[in-house]
């Protein structure tokens, strides 16, 4: 039975939440207050004490990782590890539901689930049938339109298009054609999983009654991040007994950009609310920092949160003169702590706002031989676009066949496997590299359908630039422009990959700068040799590893030591997000900061550096979030320029006062030619208005591209 020590592990309110099994219960609480712990214990209470069959308990959370974690926590608490598959994500539940029930729609139980990649293949197939252009961008747009149409119709499209024999299936528009192919092959994408489930719940009363009777208890963690459809699933499945326990923290809602509706959590009609107020995760210093940041959000309900954990050190904010120094210092600290036996690698989590920010820290970890994993992501130098770009550089400098094969058809030049085979045979006969063979034979009929002139021109141009002593950075930029690699990503609106390429360009510029005074000339060959350390790094998995991840990925997790890097205005909060979504985004960015800070148990370090960053498009200065922290809560190191630091505070204060943050120039009343003032750069003149709403301003220090919100118009 449920043993006493388990009860002892909970405070009074947690215990109350665990024992409140009947009715609609909402648990609202800040980070680290034991929400997830309550969910796990509540499950154990239902099974161990009330004797509920685990088959009658549905326990859902947001991500696969969190579901796995939940499952293993529960397994340690219940008799004989008696957990079943109903501890899962919402999509996971839909899959299980549909495997049993989809036959009612005339679909087979072994329907296939397709991911984004498969969906693209399917879309291309349909687009070909319809005689549509099939570039990556159009495929993406096509699928986005399908997703949008499904979202608008919600489960109604299922009845109209997705039932075998449904007469509307004969439609000739893109939407119905795509659905027809889905139906033909019996494939569902992630959205369909939810809509099909809802459709069956809505249209088959016996099924609804059956499930609502089978599932006695429903509990959902991280519910602030559920969207409207996921809520419908929760309501449908819990509608019988109405024993629903939802758990969340509106201050940690970080998925509104993807359609999450935290308001549904806030407005939930509960029979009982339980507020947990004690944080068991972090030191008071860390918690105070978290609270002082989140207090700047207007759109929130204030919450009480305290901790009895020992005080611990003050939160450290460290400024650096450059990102290499930032990374070097971080890795050195980790090594020092591990060597001193105070910690192991896995105690450290390095968090960042965007995945391109891992580059500098990864290089340093590899250099100093510290094991690490990129949690839920790919190592920087293994990312596809990075390998592609480096292959182009290598082809230019080394003329190697491997690189040639990687890039010859990238972007597509209609150079398929048959052309490759033919070329390889020619190259073998003539005993020369593939590229040279291609350059010589490209005019021949066999290659007539390929678009190879531009490719050869791009490589030749880059080689000329190399011969005339142009910098690697210049050659790289030239290649990115002339080969069409960047255009391809731009057309795809693949911002993450573009950011990675920009980061690679910035790192090349940095590399050249670093070796400016060397005796040996800085050549592409030497650069490639030097970074081979990173591109060919040996990643053995043994031992414990430092964890690197985006803040989104860190949700729900905790680590003894957390280091948040890139705490620079423009990087975090992300100006891209702010530009797109204005004030709502500012508050979501701040909640993200709250999530980052509250992952830390004992030690929290925030770092940022001077220099240049593509995302910022100008001089870097500390994030407004640092400015928002009460000075008394921080140890400040690295001598941040007091002027810059003050500016960040001033900016934070000003934006907080700015009820409707103007992100467009016209809203801010700023026009071309106006004289404006900036807290850091002083006075300047607006010389250009960019389509996205930002302004190029000429200051004494040079031109800077800025958001209008940070400028004041001078009369
Ligand atoms: P988040 O909002 O980040 O998801 P949470 O509210 O889900 O956090 P948990 O992860 O459940 O919080 O708990 C945070 C930490 O506090 C965990 O290490 C957990 O084991 C511990 N904890 C929670 N409640 C207690 C308690 N009553 N006694 C001791 N430790 C506790
Ligand atoms: Mg949790």
Image: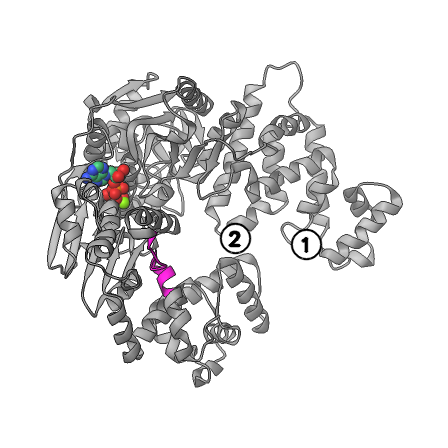
| Position above or below: 292 against 23 | above
Disc 2 designates what residue?
Answer: 491
Q: Which quadrant of the frame does ligand 2 lie within?
A: top left
In the rendered picture of this protein, how many numbered marks are placed on residues? Answer: 2
Instruction: Give the residues in magenta.
Output: 81-94
Quarter in which the C terminus is drawn: top left
The picture places residue 628, in percent across and down from the top left corner, at 22, 31
Residue in the foreground of this view, choosing between 387 and 686: 387
Image quarter of residue 399? top right
Residue in the foreground of this view, choosing between 629 and 4: 4
At x 12% / y 43%, what residue is drawn? Answer: 12
The picture places residue 668, in percent across and down from the top left corner, at 26, 43
Q: CA distance from mark 2 to mark 1?
A: 16 Å
Query: Which disc, if any, is residue 413?
Result: 1
Disc 1 secondary structure class: loop
Image quarter of residue 375? top left
Confirm whether residue 148 shows in the render: no
């Amino acid at each position: 039975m449920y043993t006493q020590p388990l009860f002892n592990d909970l405070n009074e309110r947690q215990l109350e939440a665990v024992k409140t099994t009947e009715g609609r219960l909402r648990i609202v609480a800040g980070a680290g207050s034991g929400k997830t712990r309550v969910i796990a214990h509540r499950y154990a209470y239902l099974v161990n004490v009330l004797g509920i069959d685990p088959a009658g308990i549905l326990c859902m959370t947001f991500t696969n990782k969190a579901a796995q974690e939940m499952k293993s926590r529960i397994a340690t608490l219940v008799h004989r590890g008696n957990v079943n598959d109903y501890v899962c994500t919402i999509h996971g539940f839909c899959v299980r539901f549909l495997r049993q029930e989809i036959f009612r729609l005339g679909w087979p139980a072994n329907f296939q689930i397709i991911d984004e990649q498969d969906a693209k293949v399917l879309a291309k197939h349909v687009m070909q049938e319809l005689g549509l252009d099939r570039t990556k961008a159009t495929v993406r747009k096509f699928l986005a339109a399908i997703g949008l149409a499904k979202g608008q119709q919600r489960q109604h499209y299922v009845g109209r298009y997705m039932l075998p024999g449904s007469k509307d299936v004969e439609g000739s528009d893109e939407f119905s054609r795509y659905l027809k192919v889905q139906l033909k092959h019996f494939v569902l994408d992630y959205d369909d999983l939810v809509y099909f489930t809802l459709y069956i719940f809505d249209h088959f009363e016996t099924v609804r009654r059956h499930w609502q009777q089978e599932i006695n208890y429903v509990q959902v963690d991280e519910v602030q991040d559920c969207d409207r459809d996921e809520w419908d699933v929760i309501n449908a499945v819990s509608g019988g007994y109405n024993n629903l326990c939802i758990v969340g923290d509106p201050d940690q809602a970080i998925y509104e950009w993807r359609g999450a509706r935290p308001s549904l959590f806030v407005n939930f009609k509960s029979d009982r609310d339980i507020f947990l107020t004690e944080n068991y995760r972090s030191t008071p210093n860390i918690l105070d920092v978290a609270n002082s940041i989140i207090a700047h959000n207007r759109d929130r309900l204030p919450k009480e949160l305290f901790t009895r954990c020992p005080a611990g050190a003050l939160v450290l904010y460290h400024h650096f003169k450059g990102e290499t120094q930032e990374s070097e210092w971080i890795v050195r600290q980790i090594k020092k702590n591990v060597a001193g036996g105070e910690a192991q690698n896995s105690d450290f989590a390095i968090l960042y706002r965007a995945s391109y920010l891992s580059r500098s820290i990864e290089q340093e970890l590899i250099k100093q031989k510290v094991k690490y994993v990129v949690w839920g992501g790919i190592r920087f130098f293994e990312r596809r676009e990075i390998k592609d770009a480096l292959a182009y550089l290598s082809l230019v400098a080394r003329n190697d066949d491997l690189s040639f094969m990687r890039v010859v058809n990238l972007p597509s030049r209609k150079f398929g496997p048959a052309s490759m085979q033919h070329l390889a045979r020619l190259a073998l006969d003539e005993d020369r590299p593939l590229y040279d063979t291609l350059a010589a034979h490209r005019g021949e009929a066999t290659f007539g359908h390929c678009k190879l002139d531009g490719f050869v021109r791009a490589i030749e141009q880059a080689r000329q630039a190399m011969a005339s002593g142009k910098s690697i950075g210049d050659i790289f930029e030239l290649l990115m422009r002339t080969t069409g690699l960047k255009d391809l990503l731009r057309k795809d609106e693949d911002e993450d990959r573009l950011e990675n390429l920009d980061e690679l360009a910035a790192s090349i510029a940095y590399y050249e700068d670093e070796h400016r005074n060397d005796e040996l000339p800085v050549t592409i060959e030497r650069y490639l040799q030097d970074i081979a350390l990173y591109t060919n790094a040996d990643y053995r998995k043994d031992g414990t590893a430092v964890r690197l991840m985006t803040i989104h990925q860190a949700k729900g997790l905790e680590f003894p030591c957390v280091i948040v890097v890139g705490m620079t205005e423009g990087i975090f909060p992300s100006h891209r997000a702010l530009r797109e979504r204005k004030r709502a985004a500012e508050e979501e960015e701040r909640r993200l900061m709250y999530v980052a800070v509250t992952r830390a148990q004992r030690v929290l370090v925030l770092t940022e550096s001077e220099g240049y960053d593509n995302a910022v498009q100008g001089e870097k200065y500390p994030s407004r979030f640092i400015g928002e922290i009460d000075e008394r809560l921080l140890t400040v190191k690295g001598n941040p320029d007091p002027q810059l630091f003050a500016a960040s505070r001033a900016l934070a204060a000003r934006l907080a006062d700015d009820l409707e943050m103007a992100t467009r120039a016209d809203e801010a009343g700023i026009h071309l030619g106006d004289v404006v003032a900036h807290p850091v750069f002083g006075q300047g003149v607006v010389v250009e208005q960019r389509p996205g709403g930002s302004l190029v301003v000429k200051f004494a220090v040079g031109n800077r591209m800025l958001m209008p919100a940070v400028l004041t118009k001078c009369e």
